Amino acid sequence: MQARGKDRSSPVLNVVKLIAAGAIAGVLAAAVALPAIGGAGVSAKSGMEMLDLKPEELEEPPLSERTELVDADGKRIAQFYFENRQSVTLDQVAPIMRTALIAIEDFRFYQHGPIDLEGTTRALIKNLTTGGVTQGGSSITQQYVKQVLFNAAETPEEQAAAIAPTVSRKLSELRYAMAIERKYTKDQILERYLNIAYFGAGAHGIQAAAKRFFDKPASKLTLVQAATLAGAVQNPARTDPNVGPKSRALLLERRNIVLDRMAVLENITPQEAAEAKAKKLGYKDVKFPGGCEVSDFPYFCLYVQNEILLNEDFGKTAKDRLKLLQRGGLTIKTTIDPKMQKAADKAIKKWVSSKDKPIAAQAMIVPGTGEIKAMAASRKFGGNKKKNEISYNLVADVAHGGGRGFQQGSTAKAYTLATALEEGLKYGDGFPSPAGYEASSFGAFKDCKGKPVGDPSHTVRNSSEGGGGFKTLQTGTWGSVNTFFMRLEEKVGLCKVVKLAKRIGLKRADGGKLGEFETFTLGINEVDPVTVANSYAVFAARGKYCKPLAVTEVKDRYGKVTRFKPKCSQVMDEEVADAVSGVLEGVFTKGTMSGVGGIGRDAAGKTGTTDGYTAAWFAGYTPNLSSAVSVGDPRGAFNHDLTGVTIGGRYYPYVYGASIAGPVWKESMIAALKGIEPTRFHPVDQSRFGGCSDNCAPKPKKKDRDDRGDDDDGGRPDIGDPLDLFDDRGDRRGRGGVNQLFPPND
């Protein structure tokens, strides 16, 4: 109930009113008050006419609203904001909150126009008699105008000008207020003011304030809580409860002033006011942290954040895109699957400790759509080095907040295999694969500019001794024989392998050009798990490449929804992709993952261990899901290799692709695919790829003793011992040595 009464003011009080209007509302005393002294009865209207005060339209930019990221099921996983605000409609604000605010800020709000001379006069007299500032003078409409101007300012200088105590600013404010009163109803003005006002403690708008102060929505505020927030808007910096006990005491004092004012206006009874004043402040200090640091999915969050900042669909310039992210009030639906993310996190945690310097990182992607379902790493995201946190995205490339990645190792051999199958080679085609390989001539390998890069003086080896024997596309892949793949790359052409790799999405993590050297097939380029997983997804999707997809839908503050569909294209013959899968399936049963085993459904993949054991990988897929796992030391792979290391509490003399990355892949994929109906790979066209053409293996003189097809016909599976010495160690050197071409990671 609002207090009302007749104006029985004397002529002297009328003069005081005009002086108050000039002092508090900003109309200069000399321009408005002094003419009134010369002749009683001069009205505010005549004063405004003298000053040529006419309505002036106010530009009202959208308020800064927090942006939320949600997972595939709609659950919030992160939020970004320049100002913590969530706008609400007036009917979503408790009536007692509206009453409390009007009582202390502008109790005649529903009765006056843009300026309330009676209210400003009463406020002046009250403040003078109490010796302090207990009531404000500006109307709620004027305060709204000031907040709009302040929020629209983008520099400190513009912000200072928006609140400068100058005559010109106050006159402009009045002109804007007149236009606002014509443009909106009183309820609309009040709603806008409640959403724009700052309450302290980083809370902008009544909804954020209610949650920040009392852990409840604005619709559920009580009398005590409403009075507290109404008291906070006058000087939120002075009464910010986060500053300390003194500020909380000032806020409590302001709350009680509001309660007394409500009692005077008969909004509440004196007894209700007394009971409310006896209660504690009740500030709960509810945190609303923003950014990826506090997300349960920090690496995926970083990927999405950078994807938005890079994507022109969200703004023409990087500045526009950042502003939209921090202030746009968007709800961004993402592709992340909490179940699959949990599976990756759990498997990595089992094999690699968050305290270890070497890091395991994993990405999961859906073939045929490019949807990223999980991004995990063994170390916590953050800037605290004492806690062994990492401050960049280990799972992605530099463009998405990542680092320089690790050399790919023998997972790159799949690209050479695919090229050979495209060129018409069959499963049974092969070559003798001795212990060492040297280019037949300087021009044996040419990059895509036609420049010779083969170096006959450089020898690629399988191991320190021994030969590999004759290897086919199948046995050479299962055993991951270096010299075989060098011969194969020489036969099909380096440039063709490079072009195929690019076609299916391979790129360097640092954004540079792929290194085109004869050892390309051995994985000399530094890459990231998202890129590798997505390239392998092409084989799973029968030759269809899809750009990695993290965002499926964006809803703006007005409810408009924009959907983002997969961007895919057929980049490889379906039957060639099927044939690649047909070979890579054997890695689990006859090759370097045979000691780890499969996952109980159709799966294909490839281990990778780099020369010098600088990094280890496993990349693999089912028809439903593709994933890549890397293990390496971000301090610098060449200076901190994976020899003689303890990881996850286990000591490894050498870390191979099947030592850690392989088991992480296996366990995470089993858990991630649980409940998903197994899908079979498409049958290989044996008439096209079966048998051999003109590179057939010689008839064996004796039976292969272990039928593994590995280099020495007597080795054991690659499981944490030096069997992989010759099968997975991608040579780090290009012509002239890749150590010079690609410096170690930092």
Image (cartoon, rainbow, N blue to C red):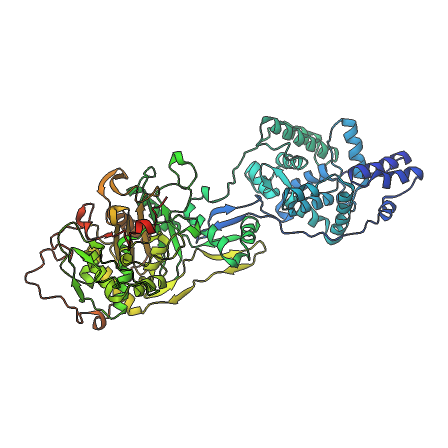
Residue lying at the far right of the rendered structure: 39
Is 393 located above or below residue 129 in the figure? below
Note whether residue 513 is visible. yes
Report which quarter residue 383 is drawn in.
Answer: top left
Q: Position of residue 147 (x, y in %)?
A: 68, 44
Q: Nearer the viewer, residue 697 or 219?
A: 697
Query: Horizontal and vertical percent for residue 500?
Result: 33, 64
Q: How many numbered badges does the structure rendering display?
A: 0
Residue 675 seen in the figure:
no
Describe residue 149's horizontal placement relative to residue 526 as left or right.
Answer: right
Considering depth in this image, is 401 or 641 the residue closer to the camera? 641
Left or right of 60 on screen, residue 685: left
Q: Quadrant of the N terminus?
A: top right
In percent of width and height, residue 373 lies at: 38, 53
Relative height, residue 191 to residue 495 (above, below): above
Picture quadrant of residue 365? bottom left
Give coordinates of residue 125: x percent, y percent: 80, 31
In the rendered view, tell whether residue 433 sits above or below residue 378.
below
Placement of the C terminus among the 4 image quadrants: top left
Please state if 132 lies on the left or on the right of 496 as rendered.
right
Q: Residue at x 21, y 73 (%)?
A: 687
